[in-house]
Structure formats: C-alpha cells, structure tokens
Image (cartoon, helix red, strand yellow):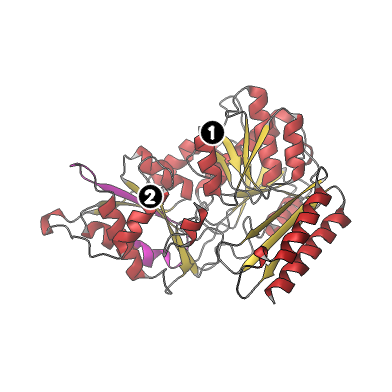
Amino acid sequence: MHEKRMTRRYFGTDGIRGRTNAWPMTAQLAMQVGMAAGTHFQRGDHRHRVVIGKDTRLSGYMVENALVAGFTAVGMDVVQFGPIPTPAVAMLAHSMRADLGVMISASHNPYFDNGIKLFGPDGYKLSDEDELKIEALIEQQVPLAASKDIGRARRVEDARGRYIHAVKSSFPADLRLDGLKIVIDCANGAAYQVAPSALWELGATVVAVGVNPNGTNINDGCGSTAPLLCQETVVSSGADIGIALDGDADRLIVVDEKGQIVDGDQIMALIAANFARAGTLRGGGLVATVMSNLGLERFLTGQGIALERTSVGDRYVLERMRSGGFNVGGEQSGHMILSDYATTGDGTVAALQVLAALVRSGKPASETLHQFDPVPQLLKNVRFSGGKPLEHDDVRRVIAQAQAELTGVGRLVIRPSGTEPVIRVMAEGDREEQVRDVVDRICAAVEKAAA
C-alpha cells in the first residue's frame, strides 16, 4: 500500500503539495486538477457542485482561480468559502451535499509552498482509488462541457459562521468558558477569525495572536510549529492556557499556564481517558502512530485502554479508525481526529475537548494536562545518497542487537522518509543514556553502509 503511494506522480500522503509556481504547484496543474477531479466526480444527472476553501497564503488567489476555471470548464458549479480551516471544508462539503471539497493549503509549511487537498462527498479524504483515477485523468484531454453547461461560481459569506456553530456544538452543553483567559495563536492562517470567535462566544476571555495574515506571514514565528510566541504570551498575560493551531487549523499544540508545551500524546491521553470514563470511547482504545511515546502506551494500558499504532501520517490514523470503529486518534505532532465531531483532524474541536476537561477538573492546566511522564525519546535523521542501507547486513545486525537490548524497557522505530533520501532512527526507553547509545550506533552503521 505504501509503495503505491510513493510511486504517484502528483498525490502524496496529504494531497498535492510543493513550492508555488514550480511543478507540480502551478496554476496550469491546478486547472488540470480541477478538470480531472470535476470529471471524475460527475456522477448522475444532478447539478454537480464543488466547495473550495483556502488558508491565507498569497498564492491562494492564483490556485483558487485556476481550480475554479478547471471545475467550471467541465460543468461543475463552484462555491468559494475564502479563508477557512481544512476541517470546515470537509464538514461543509458534506452538509452542502457537494460532490467534492477542496482545501488550498500547505498546512504548517512556509507561505511560499501551497497544496491541494481533496475531500469526497462524505467529508473524508479521497481513497487511493479515487486519487489514482484523478491522476490518470490529469494526463488526458478530458471532455469540456458544452457552452450552455459551463459551471457557475459564487462566494458564500456565512461559511465561517456555519463552522463556528458546528465547532461549538462539540462542546458540552452544560459547560461555559467564563472565567478562563485563553491565548489562541492562529498562525496567521485559516482559523484567524473562527477560532477566537468560537472561544469568545463560549464565554472565554480571549488573547488572540497570529491573527493578522498578510499573505506571507502564515506559520512565520507563530502557530503550532513555532509555539514560543504562544508560550511567551501565556506567561506575560497570565492566561490559564494557550492553544496554538497550524496554518490550516487541523492540528494544535497546547501550552499550560506555566508556559510549558503539551504535545499530542498528552492531549490524546486526556481525551481518551475522559471518553473512557464517560463510556463514550469506541473501538476499545486509541489510534496513534509509531512515534507516540511509550509513556502514553503504558498510561493507556493502566487505564484498560488499548493503543493501536499506525505508520506516520494522519491519513493512516484515520484509515485504522474507520476500519476498527475508533472515535479517538491522532499524532504526537498535534493532529487530533475525533470522529464523533469531524471527518478529519480539527485543532479547534480538539482544543474544546481539552478546555472542557480543564473546566470540569477545576485544576490548573499543568495538572490537568499532565497525564503521564514521557520516557526519554530520541529521533535522528541520516541522509544517504543512494542504495538501500537498511538492507545491508551490518545495519541489520546492529538493529537486531538494539532491539534485543530494548526488549521490555523501550522501543525502536526505523523508517525511511517517504519524501526525501533520509532514514529516520527513533528509540525510546527508561534510560536516556541507553536510548542515545542505541540511536548513535544505528546511525553510524547506516552512514557507513551508505558511504
């Protein structure tokens, strides 16, 4: 399955992404994607519709107009939302009975990158099969609509309000955020209007940063990948908690009242444990990736909650959630998928679950959000120029020895990057010096084999 994804020409694990005005993220290809996806999703005799959202990148205008041209050229009507989070596009594609949803974003990447994510009429990211069929159509000359059948395009101004309402409905009806001072860092991205509004409407005192997008400052020194701004603002303003979203608002990092970062593992532990106590946890456990800390696994085991691990990527987490009937999943990096409320990762929805736990506990965030002590974890990347160093006999021997050493006290994850010639070596265990030694030995063996 993974090999097939790596051989694709356009689609990666999270849509099409790249540097703007360089292949494949050009206006020409965006128009071809619109024509190909529009052709693929024209099923039946009804008037076909696609909804499009974007983040705040300068290139969003260019990519959006190119997509609109492609979709309307093959006879699809287009509804444009403007800047709005990725999960809002997924939600509105379903609620507006659209045949397709499109988000224009490169997530947490700098402004000069952009991307195209596609959602089906059910609000879920497209299947492998659909993406491969769209790829095949991009290479072909698709039939254009007759002049009288060209699609119409219109902007919907209340999309943000609809999303705010949906997000608020995920928050327990018996709770309010009155008395809480919350820092919200929107990364100068897609949630710069909706996230502060949702928190304010629920009663919080809101300190908003990263809410002045100018086209080039998305994720620049702010947001979940640069949480220092959120940390400093929490401490300087005396806030109870901080929430840092990424550029398209499908992931979050939380900051406690002391300015300490709370990663996705702690957030998942909190939500899964609370759901289990309330009897609403489905699937018997939590779905996370191979990168989640061993401390999380031990905590969940102690609570009688299973941990299912997948390959890195929220796509794989969601696949396992859907096949196993789970309703809580996510990544250490902050992607949280709560399928009772959303069909994809939603940083704002996850933040509201964290805030609900904070309100109910009546304790400071530093206590409420510290569910377990993570074990020492170390990740190193080894770049190589060619070949398959992981298949070298000496590398296999060192890895086998390391796995034997960590049995019962730690964990080893070694994986090649799907996007660059890099081997990622991660180890964790109770003894920090052992973890460091194991990682260094494997990295040295890989470097020698790749030389």
Q: Circle 2 sits on which residue?
A: 129
Where residue 264 sits: x, y (%)?
Answer: 67, 46
Viewer-side residue, 295 vs 191: 295
How many residues crowd mark 1 within 10 Å: few (<14), some (14–19), many (20+)?
Answer: some
Residue drawn at point x = 68 percent, y = 54 percent: 230
Distance from Cα at disc 2 to Cα at disc 1: 20 Å
**86 to 388, vertically: above or below:** above
Where residue 282 sits: x, y (%)?
Answer: 57, 28
Q: Who comes first in sequence, dot 2 or dot 1?
A: 2
Residue drawn at point x = 29 percent, y = 60 percent: 137
Left-right relation of 217 to 239: left
Q: Is residue 173 something one can see in this rendering?
A: yes
Viewer-side residue, 357 vs 411: 411
Magenta highlight on residue 60: yes
Amino acid type indicated by mark 1: Gly
Q: Is residue 339 something one can see in this rendering?
A: no
How many residues crowd mark 2 within 10 Å: few (<14), some (14–19), many (20+)?
Answer: few
Amino acid type indicated by mark 2: Glu
Left-right relation of 274 to 186: right
Image quadrant assignment for residue 147: bottom left
Secondary element at tag 2: helix
Residue drawn at point x = 43 percent, y = 60 percent: 11
Viewer-side residue, 439 vs 220: 439
**269 to 190, vertically: above or below:** above
Q: Circle 1 sits on which residue?
A: 324
Secondary element at tag 1: helix
Image quadrant assignment for residue 203: top right
Left-right relation of 176 to 374: left
- Magenta stretch bounds: 43-64
Where residue 379 sits: x, y (%)?
Answer: 73, 59
Image quadrant assignment for residue 338: top right
